[in-house]
Amino acid sequence: MIPLPQPLKIIKKKENYALFEIKALWPGYGTTIGNTLRKILLSSLEGAAVTKVKIKGVSHEFSTIPGITEDILHILMNLKQLRFKVFSEEPQKVTLKQKGEKEVKGAALELPPQIELVNPNLTIATLSDKKASLEMELQVEKGVGYQVQELRKKGKMEIGDMALDAIFTPIKRVNYKVENMRVGGRTDFDRLEIEIETDGTITPENALQKAFDILLSHLTFLASNLEQKKETKGSLSKEIFQKSIKDLELSSKILNILLKNKIEKVPEILDKSEEELLSLKGMGKKGVKELKKSLEKIGLTLK
């Protein structure tokens, strides 16, 4: 029996970063588990991001606004870096209205109660003139992984809307390292280290737990599905074993041929090949064809 590893430990923790360690993994399991968790963490965790924006007086991303240092492309890049916690399944509307000479940060956004911004100090734009103004409306929604803007351009877009590539994943960085370690008399067991850095909308511990949950739910589903198939196959085999050829939809001619050759149960047919059945006196190709059709109706085929 393959032994289980030692319990997972956190060996380093700092703000949104954590380094996890799993010792005494069976040889080869370190890479298997580490690589699998890394892929799940980067691609499958839910997060929230700005998916489209409408800026007053701007019709496309290659525009500029008088009195604002950054061009629109630069502002859109900044908006992509805003990180939100969204406590609703519906897309949320966020607005911004700023005037005068100032640095506009995320804290200036007007948020609905269903949203929390975790990086309010992020600079969105710099208003360099007392007469400058910036007004915009953002759409923030939940999603998984990374989604390119072309997917949303096909949806409902109003005049002036600019779709953004959405970085939904709350994971900023994840790496793993595998080293050999001694367990008993063996030196080829694995020690796995996994380091995770998040965007602050989720802790590294919760992120890793969600990755484990996703992996476990898939494995549990597939295992139970396989078990159901085994049970179905077992009950089907028992039923077929007891089935008489008289239960098949056969003409009296074919039925009599089989009975004359002492073939009375369905399994006795399944034991014979098509050539063996053709050798039975009076069967012929039409008889074998009829027999095959009858068997197919109950999900069986000849040997």
Image (cartoon, rainbow, N blue to C red):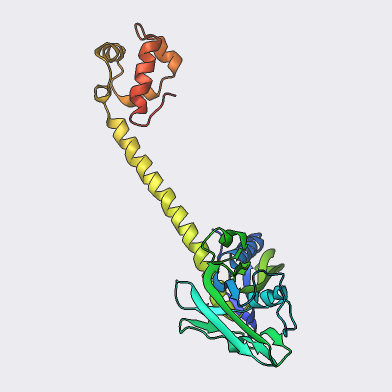
Quadrant into which the C terminus falls: top left
Q: Position of residue 271 (x, y in %)?
A: 40, 23
- Furthest residue to the top? 281
132 relative to 231, above or below? below
Q: Residue at x 56, y 76 (%)?
A: 138
> Closest to the observer: 245 or 83?
83
Q: Is residue 73 above or below residue 221?
A: below
Closer-to-camera residue (114/111): 111
Q: Position of residue 300 (x, y in %)?
A: 38, 29
Q: Is residue 71 visible?
A: yes
Q: Position of residue 249 (x, y in %)?
A: 27, 22
Q: Quadrant of residue 283?
A: top left
**Where's the N terminus, which quadrant?**
bottom right
Number of marks:
0
Percent from the top left, x then y, of residue 56?
Answer: 61, 78
- Note whether residue 202 is visible: no
- Residue drawn at point x = 62 percent, y = 63 percent: 149
Quadrant of residue 171 in the image?
A: bottom right
Q: Is residue 49 left or right of residue 293?
A: right
214 lies left or right of 229: right
For the residue pair 196 and 94, the one nearer the viewer reads as 94
Q: Residue at x 45, y 58 (%)?
A: 220
Name the residue located 27 percent from the left edge and 31 percent from the top edge.
242
